[in-house]
Amino acid sequence: MMSAAEQEISASSSGAARLAGFARVTTHDVDEAAEQIGRIFCPHDLKPVRARASGFSARHNCAAFDGFSVNYVAYGGSVTIDPGCLDRFFLVQMPITGRADIRAGSREITTAPARTASLLSPTIPTRMVWTDCAQLILLLDRRMVEQRAAALSGKAAGTVEFDPVIDLTTPASRALRGRLEDLTTLAERLGPSCRLTELAMAQWREVLLDHILTGQRHGLSDAIRRFAGQAERLPRALRAARDCLAAHADAPLDLAQLASASGIGIRALQLGFRRYFGISISQMLLDLRLASLHARLARAAPDASITDMAFELGFTHLGRMAGAYRQKFGETPSATLRRSSRLPRQGRLSS
């Protein structure tokens, strides 16, 4: 049974609180809200817009997964939230009720249900004003996002910064909102003590990363499109060559085969890769193999053999492979495997 305070907070919103079985914070005290929610997200300043304002309330429900979490956060009244830089994670904020005025770096946006949401990057300082606002919030681990962006773009792992505005009228953004709602409903149905299979957890990570990295605008969007052969001006010959390279990534590089698949000469192919992809053919092959290795390690069992996976993907020199992997993803293959094996293999939802 809900306490009187919980009933008041629930009544303050026009819609029922989501993830009610995953309650973390329920309070009318500003300092308590800032401290407890800060432990879940990050330390931040929280203040009512008007001093001594009545009607303040805070609720935070959180279902935590491996590398991401889905959250319901609601504030009664009008409050300023100043986290500065988030540092460790990205936040997708989907408004349910009320409004939020957000300043992310030099950008200023106002979010509203079914119209505009926000995507906050860990390196961009943020300050917000929430007014009788409730939001579904997807938290994504920074390293996970940056490593996937590196794999998709052919670049070394580094900072990824998103356009903070999510226009909820576009198909891509509506799809992202739908997946977040699906995840929330799944967590509610299973409850805090239920489990997901390892495969289901991995599939959710793939879906969410795909939606934000290919559906939302960020600094590596163009590089990802070029590396995937999706750039509008990419000649058909180069698209065919890249597809052939990807299909035979585990085999030794065969320039004659690529030239035959593309219908142009080897020299034109080499120049085309440099011009349109910004890398050589051999570098793209290496990036394709590294991306495949990273994906395998991220879902591998703790006793998996890195050597076997490397040879299956066409690597013949393990030392060079390890060096290239570390340069691209910021860690060794064994570190990726250890980090993956430390994740709860049963896929438990935590409250």
Image (cartoon, rainbow, N blue to C red):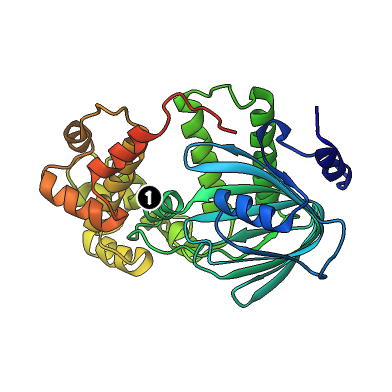
Callout 1 crowding tier (Cα within 10 Å): few <14, some 14–19, many ≥20: some
Camera-nearest residue between 241 and 81: 81
Q: Residue at x 66, y 34 (%)?
A: 22
Camera-nearest residue between 139 and 26: 26
Camera-nearest residue between 6 and 142: 6
Which residue lies under the disc numbered 1?
A: 240
Left or right placement of residue 324 versus residue 184 in this view = left
Camera-nearest residue between 57 and 245: 57
**Residue 336 shows up from this direction:** yes
**Residue 247 shows up from this direction:** no
Q: Is residue 100 above or below residue 329?
A: below
Left or right placement of residue 281 versus residue 127 in this view = left
Left or right placement of residue 279 versus residue 350 in this view = left
Residue 1 in the image: state x and y as whole percent: 80, 27
Residue 34 in the image: state x and y as whole percent: 65, 57
Q: Residue at x 89, y 42 (%)?
A: 11
Q: Quadrant of residue 345?
A: top left
Q: Amino acid at mark 1?
A: Ala
Residue 194 in the image: state x and y as whole percent: 58, 21
Left or right placement of residue 130 versus residue 240 in this view = right
**Count of picture labels:** 1
- Name the image quarter holding the C terminus: top right
Residue 23 in the image: state x and y as whole percent: 68, 37
Q: Provide the secondary structure element on which disc 1 rests.
A: helix
Q: Is residue 311 above or below residue 171?
A: above
Q: Residue at x 33, y 32 (%)?
A: 341
Q: Quadrant of residue 188?
A: top right
Q: Residue at x 33, y 46 (%)?
A: 291
